[in-house]
Amino acid sequence: MFQGSIVALATPFDADGGLDERRLAELVEWHVDQGTHGIVPCGTTGESATLSHGEHLRVVEICVETAAGRVPIIAGTGSNSTSEAITLTRRAKEAGADAALLIAPYYNKPTQEGLFRHHQAIAEAVDIPQVLYNVPGRTVVNMAPETVERLCAFDNIVAIKEATGSVAVTGEIIRRCGDRMAVISGDDFSNLGLLAMGAVAAISVTANIVPADMSAMFNVWDKHDFGRAQELHYQMIPLHTAMFIETSPIPVKTALAMMGRIGEQLRLPLCPIGEANREVLRETLADYGLLKERAA
């Protein structure tokens, strides 16, 4: 289930700010056609923090129904409230998700023991494969490798999305956990390096706009064509940079809108990209051949 390019899917909204179900289904179908290996709805890139519980469930349902078993759906179900995370995870399982992605609790700043007990409670409450998500840049708390190792004791905690960008931290997790827990890159700049260390996949923002290239990088890596994997990795670096020119998912949603895939609508407190950065983003996409006017 955890292999290759797993897209951290953006959530399209309509002109009135509601969920754009048609565009969401079209995105899922496009990713399947382009070779994406898995889909994460309702993560950070999917603006999960501003989705109602009803919308959250509906996004997962649409992804499951559209994918129809062709690729796994790993639903973002994390929260800074343990009881809420349990509820969201249980609903995702009922909707047919293949696994759940659980961000470390944000704002509360739990201790390592608190992190352990949070994930223990979810693992014991919902029997579904669970992916830890360590992203201290968003949560202001770092899950230590020692805590990750303790969580290996639960059979349904099967992977971690490591988004610190630290080769040292990732290496320590792999050293401690071995084959008991799959490691997934959560930082596109680190994808290739973490593969070399033993990671098996990436949950990628950039895959939203170049799904074929991102999946190709993992495919050629699996065939031991490391030179071609390097070429693809370095080719995509300008896109990785552009996807974080402002707070994600502002740039990636703007890029998808420029490509005609979705509308540009964001939910406050996220707001439209600044005009100077819009032009930088447009130029980057054009240079890559992603905009029709430049491609022609």
Image: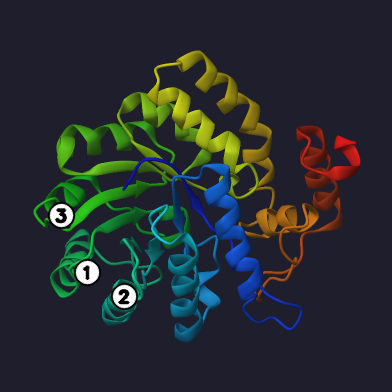
Q: Are marks 3 and 1 in contact (CB under 8 Å)?
A: no
Q: Residue at x 54, y 65 (%)?
A: 46
The answer to which of marks 3 and 1 sits earlier in the sequence is 1
Q: Is residue 259 visible?
A: yes
Which circle marks residue 85 in the picture? 2
Q: Residue at x 35, y 55 (%)?
A: 133
Q: Is residue 57 above or below residue 244?
A: below
Between label 2 and label 1, give the one nearer the viewer: 2
Tell me if mark 2 has few (under 14), some (14-19) or many (20+) residues whose alpha carbon lies within 10 angstroms of its own. Answer: many
Q: Are marks 2 and 1 in contact (CB under 8 Å)?
A: yes
Which amino acid is tagged 3?
Leu
Q: Is residue 99 above or below residue 21?
A: above
Residue that numbered label 1 is attached to: 118
Residue that numbered label 3 is attached to: 151
- The quarter holding residue 254 reads bottom right
Tag 3's secondary structure?
helix
> Relative to residue 8, is residue 134 drawn left or right?
left
Which amino acid is tagged 2?
Ala
> Relative to residue 18, is residue 205 drawn left or right?
left
Tag 2's secondary structure?
helix
Q: Are marks 3 and 2 in contact (CB under 8 Å)?
A: no
- Where is residue 296? Give x, y as percent: 90, 36
- Nearer to me, 84 or 208: 208
The answer to which of marks 2 and 1 sits earlier in the sequence is 2
The span from disc 2 to disc 1 (Cα, nearest Å) is 9 Å
Which amino acid is tagged 1?
His
- Where is residue 124? Give x, y as percent: 13, 70
- The quarter holding residue 223 reads top left
Which circle marks residue 207 in the picture? none
